Amino acid sequence: MAQLIREFRASYAFVERNFNLVRRYWGWEVVWMCYSIASTLSITYIGAGMEAISGVQVDTNYLIMYLLIGTLVWRFLAIVFDNISEMIAWERWEDTIEYTFMAPITRLTQMTGQTVFAVAYSLLSTAILLGIVALFFHLDLSQANLFGATVMLLAGSLSFIGLGILASVLPLLFPERGAQMTHVVQAVFLLISGVYYPIEVLPQWMQPLARVSPATFVLQGMRATILEGAPTRSLWPHLWPLLVAGLVTLPLGLYIFRLGERYAKRTGKLKRNG
Amino acid sequence: MYANNEIALHVAGVTKRFVRSEGIRWPWKHNSNGPKPVVAVDNVSFDVARGEVFGILGPNGSGKSTLVRCLATLLIPDEGQIMIFGHDALREEMAVKRLINRVSVEASFFKKLTPMENLLYGARLYGLDARQARKQVVEILTRLGLKREDISRPMEEMSRGMQQKVAIARAFLTQPILLLLDEPTTGLDPRSKREVQAFVEELRDCHDATILLTTHDMQEADALCNRVAIIDDGKIVALDTPANLKASVARTNRHEVTLEDVFMELTGKRLQTEEETDE
């Protein structure tokens, strides 16, 4: 029990620290939110303008909702991924990495704290974004199964947490360019996961990748619940692959991270000088 | 040897090499020499008794910080063994981490956070109760000369001396029984240096802490340490009490022999200060 309390306190250390950092860097939060709003609106307006672009009658509201779901779900998953994959880059930048790695905590404890914060922060950011974007468009959510959508989002975040842990090894192994490499990982998922288009439009050779991307399942489930009001029990075909992906990527991420940490300690890559 | 027989730290044959990265190595451009490893710590062995203040004296680049990082579980030695209060630093890493803490030459903190926020983060990582830790943070920091209002100011607004005091408080807060002080006073003004040294003296005299102190300040080593190891190019070239080290060097001039003289005698080099190296 005492051990559990100790681990809980240690996990909470990361939640509290990240909350304090967000508070202190509030200017960045405002800038980032402005960027997110502009980016979300510009993508969603493609749907609003499609009839004028193509000269063909289209279901504009459906298209707007289709793109908006893509944008918001991607924003949510990307924030979860960023918060976890950049934890090492962040500590390197602040020069605190050695203190965190010297503390008597397991990486599981560290990742748990980081993950709790990432999911809470991401949910809040996405909700604010949705609230602001709703002022620009008439969003008809009367048919939407919002509970089912939340279940899909949380199930999807499991695998993105695992992928984030895997990607966080990059800044550990490549102190100078590792953080940028995580953006490449994110860009590939954005390309193949049908965020703004159905995966069927991708080249044949890309489609197998698209079908195993966890984001594809999240997006398909989210569109089913919000656009078609699919009941929660019908989501199982979208849910189980996400749960399996989470079961694989989470322990795999922790294992790879442990190997990366060991390599960094052998080669002196935790710290670049001294 | 120090009077206490309990061994706090046992270092046996520790060697640490680094391979310098030489960019991309193309397979068709075979270089028979290959990247040469740099030996940062070379077959270092010593024991530190419980309650002892053990100094490691050496110039920049002599391997002091690498050795401390090995002790702090931040580097894995290529050879040798490190035992801390009977726990193997490699195999029983978590047990060792609970017993140690380290203050490095750079006071590394989340710069936008206050000392209280930074120290509470550290306290939680070590499983301490936050309410108790808050009280202790105020006590330790005021004892180290920080004003109460400084405790809730962002770290980035503080002088280096103040930041270093917060770093010492962070280490002390977790009550380590082995404290690794890696050049804690380098770059501090004389007053801050004296305050930090007084705190180390208090730790030595009033708390059950074993201290390993690396420095290139000979007076500091002389004043604080029970024994001193002189390290050069990763090797220990002498290890004894400051008095015995000084006695081992013949008095050539009329002046009193210092640890600087000992170092020059043993290595043919001067001990540089951080400032000199930066220049």
Image: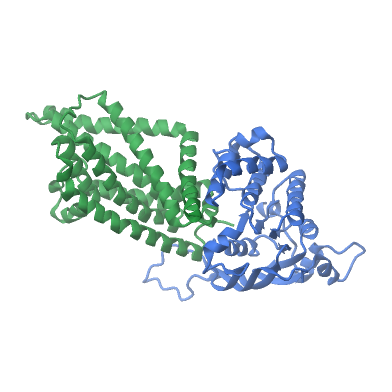
Query: What percent of the width, then of the height, locates residue B20?
Result: 51, 65
Q: Residue at x 70, y 65 (%)?
A: B50
Q: Residue furthest front?
A: A1
Compared to residue B202, the image places residue A138 above or below, namely above
Chain given the colour blue: B
Depth check, front residue: B264 or B182: B182
Compared to residue A91, the image places residue B84 above or below, namely below
Q: Residue at x 17, y 38 (%)?
A: A225
Instruction: Look at the image and tell me whether residue A271 can be seen.
Output: no
Compared to residue B33, the image places residue B276 above or below, namely above
Residue B228 sits in quarter: bottom right
Q: Quadrant of the C terminus of chain A?
A: bottom right
Q: How is the image coloured?
A: by chain
Query: What percent of the width, then of the height, locates residue A114?
Result: 42, 47
Residue B84 sits in quarter: bottom right
Q: Residue furthest right?
A: B254
Depth check, front residue: B121 or B229: B121
Instruction: State left or right for residue A85 relative to residue B163.
Output: left
Instruction: Look at the image and tell me whether residue B78 can be seen.
Output: yes
Query: What percent of the width, then of the height, locates residue A121?
Result: 38, 38
Chain given the colour green: A
Q: Residue at x 10, y 31 (%)?
A: A54
Depth check, front residue: B277 or A199: A199
Instruction: State left or right for residue A138 relative to residue B240.
Output: left
Query: What percent of the width, then of the height, locates residue A32?
Result: 38, 34
Instruction: State left or right for residue B52 relative to residue B124.
Output: right
Residue A273 sits in quarter: bottom right
Q: Residue furthest left?
A: A56
